[in-house]
Image (tube, rainbow, N blue to C red):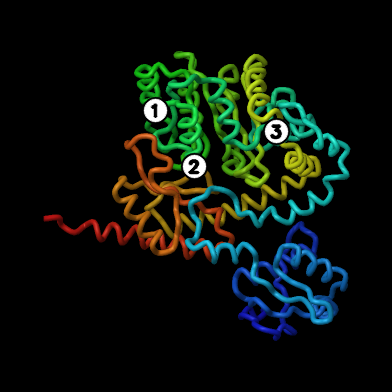
Amino acid sequence: MLDRAVIPGDAMESWKPNIEEGPAPLYERIADAIERDIHESRLAPGARLPAHRDLAHALSIGTGTVTKAYGEAERRGLLSSQVGRGSFVTAPIEAQDRAAAGPVDLAYNFPPVGLTSRYLAEAMGRLWRRQDFTATSRYTAPEGLDSVRSAASRWIRDRHELEVASAGNLIQTNGGQHGLSLLLQTLCRSGDTVLCEAVTFHGLKLVARAANLKLRGIALDSQGLLPEALERAIASTGSKVLYTVPTLQNPTAATMSAARRREVVAIARRYDVLIIEDDAYRAIARGSSRMPPALADLAPERTFYVASISKSISPGLRLAFLLPPDTSWRERILDNIVATGYAPPAQNALIFAQWVEEGTVDALVGNVLQEMQARTAMALRILGDAVSKPGADQTLHVWMPLDSLRAERAYGRALRAGVQITPPDAPMVDHSISGLRICLGSVTDRSALQRALGIVLHALKDEMSGSSAAVV
């Protein structure tokens, strides 16, 4: 067994990486080992790594492999090379930013960015070789490049299990929120009411406010929207648009059952309500098991499907796809794209297309699923019954149901202790449901997440013990 103690300063001659098995090339796995040892404080900033030939000899591998590994680590910002002196450990940029930023971030909902960074740099280096790269220097069609939409249709059919998806009817957007904005702009007029879960995606609230739309919250349980509550809301408001996140609902992480989805579709048909299905988390929830059918497959004639890759691959690409029910709706959405931005950005979308075409996307999503399964298990182990059981074995967020006053107090206690979680009022549409959303992906490493979750648990316990005192 290798000695895993912290190795500081220049005393690096004895250091050997703990190389994990996996499909990635050996040099990448060595760079991964360097990154782990830095993040887990086994390699101190300023430490000098062994010379290339010395580490190659210790590992019984070629010197060229070590050279590539050190080069990869330097590209990630982990090492700096000095001619004649060697390679030295630097604090990762993300760790530096985190230290300077203050509180540990459990407020923003995206997968760990370090899982895609090396793939992203490699893809950008080869992007210019693509035959369709020159098209990115011109205005593209408002629905996006054919090659991008072809890749997206493969992705959605495979990872989202959506049978009705085809390249010809997909529309590329600048992220899921842009897609949502386009849909509300197309489907609603100023002053209209949009139905949604009682706690919902904060981006919907922002878009509705900008478009002067009203939101009406609908109660939900662990199976999703309550059909009787939905029917009452339709009758009382006359609304013709329902927005829902049926899979790993944001923020409650509930997944709507197949039976509940059929009930929602039946009600929508009965009252001629259009459905906006935000399925941003479906690829995360699916893992290796089959999910309930998408609403777009159950009711393709009235469902506008939104598939974002921000939650399953990379938020920085700002890429999502819309699937409207028919050609007439498609043309109206394209008119609004031309009016507001003319065409979606193409170069980032080509990176996604390249990943799909080469099969790299499978490794990317596999890494995210594996990491989030471990993080979800950690959150459930630490927080226990304080959080609701999520609708999948892996999720980017968990939900801690609390009344609004206790949620505000626990939020404040956690923030004062150095952990930022989602503000309680951010997802709230009405006061029938309240609690705290805790995001699991925005922290770089698991050890930091474990410490942060412990702080959240203590904040909750402090709130419960502090609120039990009698008020006279």
List x then y, in percent, for residue 168: 74, 23
| Residue pictured at 25% horizontal, 60% vertical | 466
Mark 3 element type: loop
Does residue 37 appear left or right of residue 376 in this picture? right
Q: Earlier in the sequence, mark 2 or mark 1?
A: 1
Q: Earlier in the sequence, mark 3 or mark 2?
A: 3
Q: CA distance from mark 2 to mark 1?
A: 24 Å
Q: Residue at x 68, y 67 (%)?
A: 35
Residue at 76% x, 54% y: name it.
Answer: 121
Disc 3/disc 2 C-alpha distance (Å): 33 Å
Above or below: residue 226 compared with residue 335 = below
Label 3 CA crowd tier, 10 Å (few <14, some 14–19, many 20+): many
Q: Which residue occupies the foreground of this view, 242 or 392? A: 242
Residue 419: quadrant of the picture: bottom left
- Which-is-in-front pick, marks 3 and 2? 3
Could you tell me residue 352's position as x and y percent? 74, 42
Numbered circles on residues, count: 3
- Judge left or right: residue 341 versus residue 240: right
Residue 344, labelled with which disc?
3
Task: Residue 139: give its label.
Answer: none
Q: Categorize mark 1 by other alpha carbons within 10 Å: few (<14), some (14-19), many (20+).
A: some
The residue indicated by pointer 1 is 216
The residue under label 2 is 391
The reply to whether callout 1 and callout 3 are in contact (CB within 8 Å) is: no
Q: Which element carries disc 2, helix, strand or loop? A: loop
Who is closer to the viewer here, 143 or 218? 143
Q: Amino acid at mark 3?
A: Pro
